[in-house]
Image (cartoon, grey):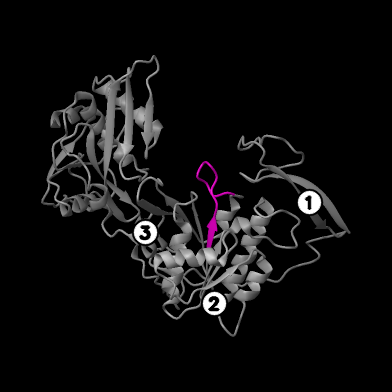
């Protein structure tokens, strides 16, 4: 006999409680808990031991018949790079980002590019009318594309359109998953239960029909994709759109990819004709850099498999307040505090009474510990008022004892700097006498530092 249960789910983090509350105990968000009804059919006397299932068929890890993954190139090199070399048939991709960052614009461009290859592409929007999508396509110059548009929110109707055997679908875009609903679920669209059910049904149908599914997801104020965390586990690839709406740069980052490397990035420039791919982001990020200014250093970073050069800007000024401000954009504020403590303890550079501002130019976010040396150099330069040597790049991790540690793929970083005309690379000290230790071959002048105390000597 069916039994009805009531439960309360937080729409922000997916936490389940048995009673309503104004504040979620798991994520501390207010007014996010909603009531949902669950019907369970639990037959009496259910015994799994008596009702045995079928025996699974197991296979060995080594397979003589190697099957190559078929990838569908979109023609957008930056998007294909982030996906690992193109779209995989039957895969599901989840794309999140702030409102107005360019998610719908990018997916419309990708859909039109695939449709030009005589493959059927369906663009289903639950937020915009068809005329609104046409206006965007007209602005992008894509009105002649054979993309099929629909404004719908019922998942049952969308799956029925996907399963058309006479006219098979190659790719489908769902914009967005928070507007979709399954009619057998007694919840409003956008709730945790609806988002989970809609995604499960769409992915199941897409894998059955071998359709590439691209899903747009809303994000919370913290930048995370709204809905249950299980949503990111269900899909094959999770992409995040990063960037400040005040900048023209947009960065597409893969945080999960079952068919390629993670943390791979694609760089785009927002223009009137849509998102334009940037083939050399290092040159773009450093285009307006003033090398003679104090507090500016160049960090040779690594995003996925791509080396990227970015400018690290620091400003140190006297504070009129008892508690100086620490403002960080594009980097970890906790790591900045650690670097300042190391400089004060190991080098005698006191900045505790000063206001410190740190910015990664271009709107990109850096998560690598390898940026420690570039940040320390920018801070010392801003504190002393002396500019760093022109044509120098920095990378290296700083420990609490002041030692400068090695980082991965140093040669790729130096090669990217040499391509852009840099002359000097200030890097961690390479240990001698170890096996499999290759010397870095480059036209750049390489300065190796063992301790952060050697950093002020380069000025």
Magenta segment main secondary structure: loop
Measure the alpha-carbon separation of dots 2 and 3: 30 Å
Q: Nearer the viewer, residue 4 or 277?
A: 277
Q: Is residue 308 above or below residue 432?
A: below
Which residue bears the numbered disc 2?
169
Mark 1 or mark 3, which is nearer the start of the sequence? 1
Q: Residues within 10 Å of mark 1 (few under 14, many from 20)?
A: some
Q: Is residue 410 above or below residue 272?
A: above
Q: Is residue 356 above or below residue 153?
A: above
Q: Is residue 383 above or below residue 227?
A: above
Which residue bears the numbered disc 3?
272
Mark 2 or mark 1, which is nearer the start of the sequence? 1
Give coordinates of residue 150: x percent, y percent. Answer: 58, 70
Measure the alpha-carbon separation of dots 1 and 2: 35 Å
Identify the image quadrant of residue 56: bottom right
Query: Residue 37 bears which disc, if any?
Result: 1
Q: Residue at x 43, y 67 (%)?
A: 138
Which range of residues does the magenta coloring cover?
A: 214-226
């Amino acid at each position: 006999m069916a039994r009805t249960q009531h439960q309360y789910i937080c729409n922000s983090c997916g936490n389940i409680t048995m009673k309503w509350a104004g504040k979620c105990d798991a994520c501390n968000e207010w007014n996010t808990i909603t009531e949902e009804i669950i019907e369970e059919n639990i037959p009496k006397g259910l015994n799994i031991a008596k009702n045995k299932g079928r025996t699974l068929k197991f296979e060995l890890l080594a397979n003589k018949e190697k099957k190559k993954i078929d990838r569908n190139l979109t023609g957008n090199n930056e998007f294909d790079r982030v996906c690992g070399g193109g779209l995989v048939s039957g895969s599901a991709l989840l794309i999140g980002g702030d409102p107005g960052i360019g998610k719908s614009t990018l997916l419309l461009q990708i859909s039109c590019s695939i449709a030009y290859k005589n493959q059927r592409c369906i663009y289903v929007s639950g937020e915009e009318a068809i005329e609104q999508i046409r206006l965007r396509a007209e602005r992008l110059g894509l009105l002649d594309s054979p993309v099929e548009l629909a404004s719908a929110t019922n998942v049952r109707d969308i799956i029925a359109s996907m399963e058309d055997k006479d006219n098979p679908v190659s790719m489908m875009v769902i914009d967005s998953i928070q507007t979709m609903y399954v009619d057998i679920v007694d919840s409003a669209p956008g709730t945790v239960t609806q988002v989970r059910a809609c995604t499960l049904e769409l992915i199941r149908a897409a894998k059955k029909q071998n359709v590439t599914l691209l899903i747009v997801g809303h994000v919370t104020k913290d930048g995370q994709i709204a809905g249950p965390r299980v949503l990111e586990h269900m899909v094959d690839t999770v992409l995040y759109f990063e960037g400040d709406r005040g900048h023209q740069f947009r960065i597409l980052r893969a945080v999960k990819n079952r068919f390629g490397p993670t943390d791979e990035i694609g760089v785009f420039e927002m223009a009137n004709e849509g998102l334009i791919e940037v083939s050399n982001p290092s040159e773009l990020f450093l285009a307006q850099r003033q090398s003679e200014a104090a507090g500016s250093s160049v960090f040779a970073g690594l995003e996925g498999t791509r080396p990227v050069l970015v400018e690290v800007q620091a400003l140190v000024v006297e504070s009129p307040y008892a508690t100086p401000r620490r403002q960080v954009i594009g980097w970890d504020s906790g790591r900045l505090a650690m670097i300042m403590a190391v400089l004060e303890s190991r080098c005698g550079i006191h900045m505790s009474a000063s206001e410190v501002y740190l910015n990664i130019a271009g709107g990109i976010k850096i998560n690598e510990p390898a940026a420690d040396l570039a940040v320390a150099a920018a801070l010392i330069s801003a504190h002393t008022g002396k500019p760093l040597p022109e044509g120098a790049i920095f990378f290296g991790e700083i420990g609490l004892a002041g030692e400068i540690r090695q980082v991965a793929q140093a040669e790729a970083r130096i090669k990217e700097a040499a391509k852009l005309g840099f002359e000097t690379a200030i890097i961690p000290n390479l240990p001698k006498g170890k096996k499999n230790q290759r010397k870095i071959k480059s036209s750049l002048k390489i300065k190796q530092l063992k301790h952060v105390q050697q950093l002020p000597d380069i000025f």
